[in-house]
Image: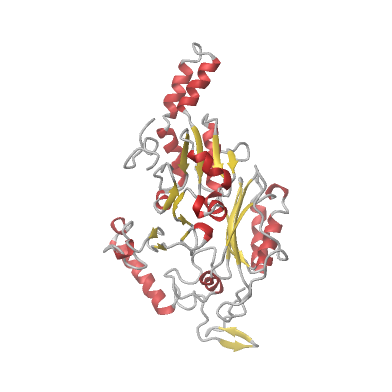
């Protein structure tokens, strides 16, 4: 196999979101959490990430009614609609989130959403309700906690892969339950591949996992072709078709294309990656059902083969076993996770740069980031009070709060 551009070839040195969907419990089934945040009367919130691959050519027709419903029930977050399905992460009260998910699944093609529910910390609730004062991004500029706002976007793919021929609706690898995952990846004959990007893998991975050293998911197909010498294998197989028996062909193929076990954060990237590998001739392709998040939720730390923390795309930045928030913070210059050690480095400047982006950012970019940070420190939000989530000098008109220009403030959840 070809070597990778990383420091060492991961396959030579391995140490180096079908089954039923995950359901969120109903309102009645959930233990009621006392409403209120630091004495407020805001109802408790829940965050649910979900996806579903489906044949969905008329996806655009769902955009307006879905956005209207989210706004009506005060659900925030981001949702992507594409010809291949739906992908999203939304935040709201349990009842409002369930209404949105029920509406989505009223379309037969989208039934059986794969869902993962994440806990909402007090800080997350503060962000959602628009009372934060601790993020350079300001209150809610980082979805899914953007205050009182939902984005429903139309795209070509629900997760960018760059190869329209890869169709998880047609074929996909075998799902492995978290409880069965350890046995599979402990087998020395299994090649364990982390489908995430370098900055995610840097803070945590499974033992023996291969790092493809990708900066974006769309680079994964190229890595596979180069790492497994796909073109050379194809030419060799074609040249020897006449001479070899069927049994000999299978043995040769098994040697060149090993059993593969893949994983990612919540499962969605593995759906495409496994479909891609199957299209390339791999016979045994497995992937972790529910992704790392489900594994960390279900498998005790004492039995775990996970090392480090798992990067997540929200305010928590990273999580550990039991889904408790991790120790990493976020560099708002490049959106990469940074440790306490990184923040003691000379390249670290809060809200501007870190050791991972300092050398690749121009002085002009750094100065823009500094200006953004000064805005936040002055107003508590980015863009000043009119664009922020606080209510500057509210004026009562007919019992409703307005700003100094007479514009009515919208209500949060």
Q: How is the image coloured?
A: secondary structure
* Residue 11, x across and y down, in percent: 40, 36
Residue in view at x 60 percent, y 54 percent: 50
* Residue 410, x across and y down, in percent: 60, 76
* Residue 337, x across and y down, in percent: 40, 59
* Residue 71, x across and y down, in percent: 64, 67
When the figure is inspected, residue 172 is found, relative to residue 50, above or below; the finding is above
Q: Is residue 226 visible?
A: yes
Residue in view at x 61 percent, y 45 percent: 84
Residue in view at x 70 percent, y 47 percent: 109
Residue in view at x 55 percent, y 30 percent: 283
Q: Is residue 165 visible?
A: no
Could you tell me which quadrant the C terminus lies in?
A: bottom right
Give the quarter of the image for residue 98.
bottom right
Nearer to us in this view, 112 or 154:
112
Q: Horizontal placement of 291 versus 352: left or right?
A: right
Q: Residue furthest front?
A: 302
């Amino acid at each position: 196999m070809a070597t990778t551009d990383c420091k060492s070839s991961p396959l030579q040195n391995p140490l180096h979101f079908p089954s039923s969907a995950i359901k969120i419990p109903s309102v009645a089934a959930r233990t009621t959490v006392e409403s209120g945040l630091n004495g407020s009367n805001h109802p408790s919130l829940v965050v649910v990430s979900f996806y579903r691959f489906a044949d969905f050519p008329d996806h655009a027709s769902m955009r307006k009614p879905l956005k209207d419903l989210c706004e009506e029930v005060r659900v925030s977050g981001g949702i992507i609609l594409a010809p291949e399905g739906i992908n999203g992460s939304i935040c709201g009260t349990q009842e409002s989130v369930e209404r949105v998910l029920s509406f989505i699944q009223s379309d037969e093609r989208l039934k059986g959403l794969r869902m993962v529910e994440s806990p909402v910390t007090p800080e997350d609730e503060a962000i959602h309700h628009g009372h934060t004062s601790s993020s350079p991004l300001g209150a809610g500029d980082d979805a899914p906690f953007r205050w009182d706002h939902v984005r429903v976007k139309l795209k070509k793919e629900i997760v960018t892969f760059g190869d329209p021929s890869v169709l998880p609706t047609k074929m996909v690898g075998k799902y492995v339950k978290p409880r069965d995952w350890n046995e599979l990846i402990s087998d020395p004959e299994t090649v364990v591949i982390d489908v995430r990007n370098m900055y995610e893998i840097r803070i945590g991975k499974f033992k023996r996992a291969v790092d493809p050293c990708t900066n974006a998911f769309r680079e994964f197909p190229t890595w596979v072709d180069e790492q497994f010498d796909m073109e050379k294998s194809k030419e060799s197989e074609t040249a020897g078709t006449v001479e070899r028996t069927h049994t000999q062909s299978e043995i040769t193929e098994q040697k060149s294309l090993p059993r593969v076990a893949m994983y990612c954060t919540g499962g969605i990237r593995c759906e495409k990656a496994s479909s891609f590998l199957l299209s390339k001739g791999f016979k045994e392709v497995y992937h972790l059902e529910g992704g790392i998040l489900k594994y960390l939720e279900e498998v005790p730390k004492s039995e775990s083969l996970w090392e480090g923390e798992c990067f997540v795309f929200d305010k928590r930045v990273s999580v550990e076993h039991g889904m408790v928030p991790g120790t990493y913070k976020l560099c708002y210059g490049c959106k990469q996770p940074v440790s306490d050690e990184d923040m003691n480095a000379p390249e670290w400047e809060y809200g501007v740069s870190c050791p991972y982006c300092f050398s690749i950012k121009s002085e002009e970019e750094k100065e823009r980031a500094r200006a953004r940070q000064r805005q936040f420190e002055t107003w508590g939000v980015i863009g000043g009070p009119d664009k922020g989530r606080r209510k500057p000098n509210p004026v009562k008109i007919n019992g409703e709060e307005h700003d100094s220009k007479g514009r009515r403030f919208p209500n949060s959840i």
